[in-house]
Image (cartoon, rainbow, N blue to C red):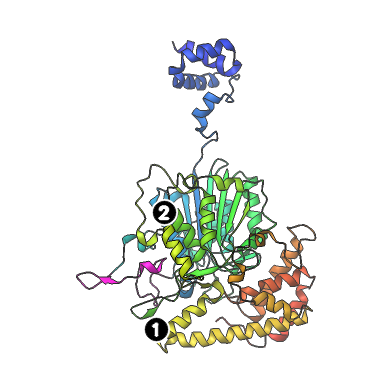
């Protein structure tokens, strides 16, 4: 009876004796009752049973030998404004992939500004697309434009747990650290200010040490920093530095907030967020769109709809890794295979990886899919190209069509607008952007000369990057020159200096832009060379002879 089963279970599990083993084999069919009996015994004070036995471990943990937790995802678009369209299109595309693979809303946290679908410049109100293949070419019987397929509108069903000004560094870090109280306070404060566009629901990670966490970030970046939208539409750019992100990851590790975590970062110089900083022993693996020194690239640029110019619709690295995910069985494909595909086809920047590369052997489904899943097949417009198509593309063009440096994405859009729309309100914006670039280049030449670094530093910081830098993996782990690692990779004094110079530039001169962020390398060089923040501040005051303004 039941008492005999209890004896057998304790005998086999606790003592592992030959007799117990023999009896176990005869009673294997009653295994489930045995487990339940052990639970009853534990309540009655039976302390001898151990879960170390392999047979029982599979009941509690699953066939992979690990205790199975759940899955969480954090998706962030860190920009605003129409010309930065691609970042929010990326984040909504990523959310679409999760939704279609059964990921529950309560496990996904989405941060995006939400100024695209009803933007006055959007020729397709309510629609956001992530591929030029999704631009409508046909009309229905009523004369309305029809998207090539229903999946093209990635805005449909795209969440916005944090939107507008609530897409902030503080909230991003609170989300990662699971600080619900801080997030709630920030959301309540924002709801009381009618002058600020934005809001949030205070959702944060509530993960455990058994869970898989996926984080994807899409935006502009610089050396050791990734951007975030301003608190006011035309205010200073907010940002997260590499040490702040590392502090959050370290906190998550110490607080047992994940079993394994994977990060995908789409930004210029995104490798600098992890190079020499991310440990290999905390079960975190990160993939970046670019190495620590060069730009990432925007894709699907130079298009139009009804003779109205469209901004770049995607980012090359992100579009590639998502297309690859959509075109394969997530259960069979690993993150490493996805990374290799993205690295191969992101042929204008060096895609990098950091941290614990053993995690890259995990299946994509173990992070992005909630079974059971009735997943629809990806539409042809969003599938990865076939091997034959890839070969043909490589033969026809060395540089993919419609791809530009992320630093040039805004200018590319403004030039595209001139070509399609002639002299419009955007012409004024084009002239302002051109003037801003000339001013920033001249300013930084003077500042660096004052700092004793000379014009060569400007040329190095602002040199156009491209085909010469395709697939040079050693760049991913190259130490910067001059090095800032003299006191170890994580140097608090260096990061305090970098933050001080960035803040001084924005308060004395003007807000950072996608273009001027290229000079964060110059800021980094000055800090690594021992130039004081005070000296740089004085140079900004001397040479920023125009009032602070945003372009």
**Which residue bears the numbered disc 1?**
420
Q: Is residue 92 shown left or right of residue 214?
A: left
User: Which label lies toward us, 2 or 1?
Assistant: 2
Front-most of residues 73 and 423: 423
State which quarter of the image contains the C terminus: bottom right
Front-most of residues 350 and 389: 389
Q: Residue at x 73, y 81 (%)?
A: 455
Is residue 380 in view? Answer: yes
* Image x and y of residue 454, in percent: 76, 80
User: Toward which corner of the image does residue 30 lie, by quadrant?
Assistant: top left
**Which residue bears the numbered disc 2?**
327
Q: Report the predominant secondary structure element of the magenta stretch.
A: loop
Q: Which residues are magenta?
A: 116-145
- Check if residue 231 falls in the magenta segment: no
Is residue 45 in view? Answer: no
User: Toward which corner of the image does residue 182 lie, by quadrant?
Assistant: bottom right
Residue furthest to the left: 141
* Image x and y of residue 480, in percent: 72, 65
Question: Of the residues under marks 2 and 1, which one precedes in the sequence?
Answer: 2
Above-or-below relation of 89 to 65: below
* Image x and y of residue 397, in percent: 48, 71
Above-or-below relation of 280 to 466: above
Identify the secondary structure beneath mark 1. Answer: helix
């Amino acid at each position: 009876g039941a008492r005999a089963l209890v004896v057998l279970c304790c005998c086999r599990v606790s003592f592992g004796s030959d007799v117990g083993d023999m009896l176990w084999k005869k009673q294997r069919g009653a295994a489930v009752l045995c487990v339940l009996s052990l639970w009853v015994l534990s309540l009655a004070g039976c302390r001898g049973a151990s879960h170390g036995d392999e047979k029982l471990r599979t009941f509690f943990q699953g066939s992979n030998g690990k205790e199975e937790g759940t899955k969480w995802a954090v998706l962030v678009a860190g920009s605003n404004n129409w010309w930065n369209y691609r970042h929010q299109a990326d984040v909504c595309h990523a959310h679409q992939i999760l939704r279609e693979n059964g990921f529950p809303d309560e496990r996904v946290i989405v941060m995006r500004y939400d100024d695209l679908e009803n933007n006055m410049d959007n020729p397709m109100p309510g629609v956001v697309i992530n591929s030029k293949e999704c631009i409508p070419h046909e009309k229905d019987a009523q004369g309305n434009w029809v998207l090539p397929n229903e999946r093209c509108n990635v805005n449909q069903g795209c969440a916005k747990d944090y939107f507008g000004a609530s897409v902030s560094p503080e909230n991003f870090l609170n989300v990662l650290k699971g600080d619900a109280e801080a997030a709630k306070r920030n959301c309540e404060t924002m709801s009381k200010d009618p002058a600020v566009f934005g809001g949030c629901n205070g959702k944060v990670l509530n993960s455990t040490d058994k869970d898989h966490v996926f984080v994807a970030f899409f935006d502009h970046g610089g050396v050791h920093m990734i951007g975030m939208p301003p608190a006011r539409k035309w205010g200073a750019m907010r940002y997260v530095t590499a040490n702040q992100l590392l502090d959050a990851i370290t906190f998550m590790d110490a607080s047992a907030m994940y079993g394994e975590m994977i990060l995908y970062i789409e930004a210029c110089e995104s490798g600098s967020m992890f190079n020499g900083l991310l440990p290999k022993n905390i079960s975190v693996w990160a993939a970046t769109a670019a190495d620590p020194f060069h730009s990432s690239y925007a894709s699907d640029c130079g298009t139009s709809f009804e003779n109205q110019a469209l901004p770049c619709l995607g980012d090359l690295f992100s579009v590639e890794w998502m297309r690859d995910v959509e075109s394969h069985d997530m259960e069979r494909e690993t993150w490493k295979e996805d990374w290799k595909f993205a690295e191969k086809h992101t042929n204008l920047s060096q895609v990098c990886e950091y941290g614990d590369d053993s995690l890259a052997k995990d299946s994509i489904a173990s992070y992005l899919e909630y079974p059971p899943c009735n997943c629809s097949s990806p539409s042809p417009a969003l599938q990865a190209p076939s091997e034959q198509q890839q070969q043909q593309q490589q033969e026809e063009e060395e540089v993919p069509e419609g791809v530009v440096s992320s630093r040039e994405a805004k200018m590319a859009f403004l030039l595209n607008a001139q070509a399609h729309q002639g002299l419009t309100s955007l012409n004024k914006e084009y002239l302002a952007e051109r003037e801003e670039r000339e001013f920033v280049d001249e300013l930084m030449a003077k500042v660096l000369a004052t700092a004793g670094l000379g014009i060569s530093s400007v040329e190095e910081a602002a040199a156009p990057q491209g085909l010469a830098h395709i697939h040079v993996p050693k760049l991913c782990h190259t130490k910067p020159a001059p090095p800032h690692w003299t006191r170890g990779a994580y140097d608090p004094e260096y990061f305090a200096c970098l933050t001080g110079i960035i803040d001084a530039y924005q308060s004395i001169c003007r807000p950072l832009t996608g273009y001027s962020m290229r000079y964060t390398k110059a800021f980094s060089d000055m800090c690594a060379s021992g130039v004081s923040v005070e000296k740089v501040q004085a140079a900004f005051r001397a040479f920023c002879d125009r009032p602070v303004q945003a372009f």
